[in-house]
Image: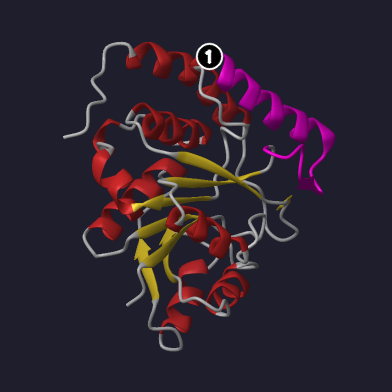
Amino acid sequence: MSDSLVIIPTYNEKENIERIIRKVFSLPFLFEILIIDDGSPDGTAEIVKSLQEEYPALHLEQRTGKLGLGTAYIHGFKWALQRKYEFIFEMDADFSHNPDDLVRLREACLNGADVAIGSRYVNGVNVVNWPMNRVLMSYFASMYVRFITRITIQDATAGFKCYRRIVLETIPMDKIRFVGYAFQIEMKFTAIKYGFNVVEVPIIFTDRTEGVSKMSTRIFREAFVGVIQMKIGSWFRNYKRA
């Protein structure tokens, strides 16, 4: 058994799922994989099942219906904490996150980070194939988050991360409110409020070439309003570690 688990939520990722699984398992270090599939009608879960005999370190959790990114990760976090993984990762299925960077995120945690973020903006803007309006929306969203919350993370909405186990044991998952874009912000903000060392590792983000993006205006709206709600709520919350 590896000490590292990569959680990949999926919904209609049949074009990408086999390639991303094979790529992760080709890395020089063994990262186990947990796929959280939200009832993909395109057969994503069936592809995963067909690969499980070949890869014993490939795990699958199936849920009924499209329940949201945040709930998928929380499901995965709880699954990981029931087992003995020390490093738990978030990663997309669409190759926007380069699996080779898993090694670098793990090394950052081995070298003192409690949370390592694959950051698009810590060294300028490192985004490939995104339309300019999407780049600007993402970049200014992170500026907005820094302005409201006063955290210093350059890529506040990043979804490529490595957590040390202690972080996920400390954060009360049942108090995480958001399920969409704002989930990524809330997890970083909460980890920082608990005093964990959150480090940004520069990556190059490449937009998907296969499949369809799940982003929507509703998700952005949740994030915009949610950041203010999250900040106000933090004034009445105790972040002392047990």
Q: What residue is drawn where x is 59% and y is 69%?
A: 20
* Residue placed most toward the observer, 232 or 215: 232
* Residue placed most toward the observer, 72 or 42: 72
- Using the rendered image of the protein, determine whether residue 178 is visible from the camera's viewpoint: no
Q: Quadrant of the C terminus?
A: top left
In the displayed structure image, the side of residue 228 where residue 200 appears, left or right: right
Q: Is residue 91 magenta?
A: no
Chief SS of the magenta region? helix
Q: Residues within 10 Å of mark 1 (few under 14, many from 20)?
A: few
* Residue placed most toward the observer, 175 or 53: 175
- Using the rendered image of the protein, determine whether residue 150 is visible from the camera's viewpoint: yes
In the displayed structure image, the side of residue 125 where residue 148 appears, left or right: left
In the displayed structure image, the side of residue 133 where residue 221 appears, left or right: left
Quickly name the residue at label 1. Answer: 148
Which amino acid type is marked by label 1? Ile
Q: Is residue 141 magenta?
A: yes
Q: Position of residue 198 (x, y in %)?
A: 47, 39
Instruction: Identify the element where label 1 is drawn.
Output: helix
Q: Position of residue 210 (x, y in %)?
A: 71, 61
